[in-house]
Amino acid sequence: MSGAPLLAAENISVAFGAGARLLLAVRNVSLAVDPGEAVGIVGESGSGKSTLARVLAGLQLPTEGVARYRGRAIFEGESAYPGAMRREVQMVFQDPYGSLNPRMTALAAVAEACRFHERCSAAAARERAVTLLADMGIGVGDAVKKPRQLSGGQRQRTSVARALAARPSLLIADEPTSAIDQSAQAQLLNLFNRLRSGGLAIVLVSHDLAVIRYLCTRVHVMHEGEFVESGETHDVFERPRHAYTQALIASIPGRTRRTAATVSGTNRE
Ligand SMILES: Nc1ncnc2c1ncn2[C@@H]1O[C@H](COP(=O)(O)OP(=O)(O)O)[C@@H](O)[C@H]1O
Ligand SMILES: [Mg+2]
């Protein structure tokens, strides 16, 4: 590892609206992601997670603060991730319907991305798409299906395959497991874990601390636009300092009414 973070965001704030309707969706947050590291952002709905993720992905200009990728500001004026940087950072959303064309098969969608990024022949793109989809657990039989014929988990894995077509160094995933059932969630998290082991850095946004704990070494707990707690995931689990974090831990299914002390006793990390 170079020692320098892959992505570093400093004092990011995002305001929407103005005057009496001013809303500070993100308030002065800073974070760093090292190469090959998975960093979690957790918080309840409306806490500002997606707005922050969109800033990191270059889709939302921050009102204040600067985000740097490999030391270079990701925004140059209004445009983000200039030049070759754009390919390196990919985003996956909660609802893959938004990023998948309903009329295109999974194979065609991934092949299109391969062709765009590699500028290769249609045949080579198709071959690579077959491999990428197979890596995501989608065989040729399912690869020729359109999004609505696939399961939620297969759709999500197709959009991950599409993102991976760019050979990214950083994947930003916004609630990727929220719209899929438990076994599909487990499968997707396994895949993310494998990708991370292979060197991919991941920013994982979730309202679910259990999902974050599985994948991420560091976590930021977001509440009303602020990071109220940040640290190594197992430390935050074992010794949550903020009442909001304690409430999030208590809300993990199967842990209802347990105290943080009980959670630490069952933490396997
Ligand atoms: N484009 C926008 N315009 C105005 N308000 C927005 C916009 N996007 C998000 N918000 C508001 O910012 C706050 C944080 O939203 P969001 O980042 O989506 O939170 P989360 O992903 O944690 O649910 C919410 O109050 C939301 O309504
Ligand atoms: Mg969100």
Image (spheres, rainbow, N blue to C red):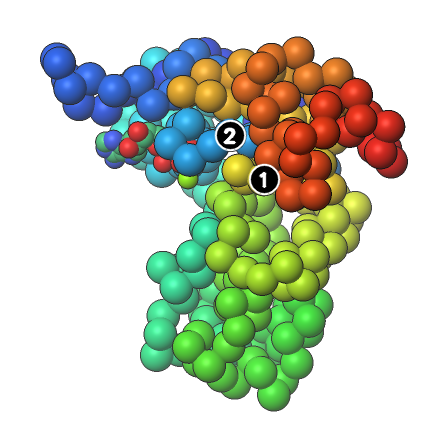
Confirm if mark 1 falls within 8 A of ligand 2.
Answer: no
| Image location of residue 30, percent across then percent down | 52, 16
Label 1 neighbour load within 10 Å: few <14, some 14-19, many 20+: many
Q: In front here: 67 or 17? A: 17
Say what amino acid the circle numbered 2 marks: Gly
Q: Quadrant of the N terminus?
A: top right
Which residue is located at x 42 percent, y 57 percent?
A: 95
How many discs appear? Answer: 2
Of 214 and 130, nearer the camera is 214
Residue drawn at x 39%, y 64% as measured from the top left: 97
Tell me, for residue 43, which label it has, or none.
2
Q: Is residue 93 visible?
A: yes
Looking at the rendering, which quadrant does residue 196 occupy? top right
Q: Secondary structure at mark 1?
A: loop
Would you name the residue on which mark 1 appears?
208
Residue type marked 1 = Asp
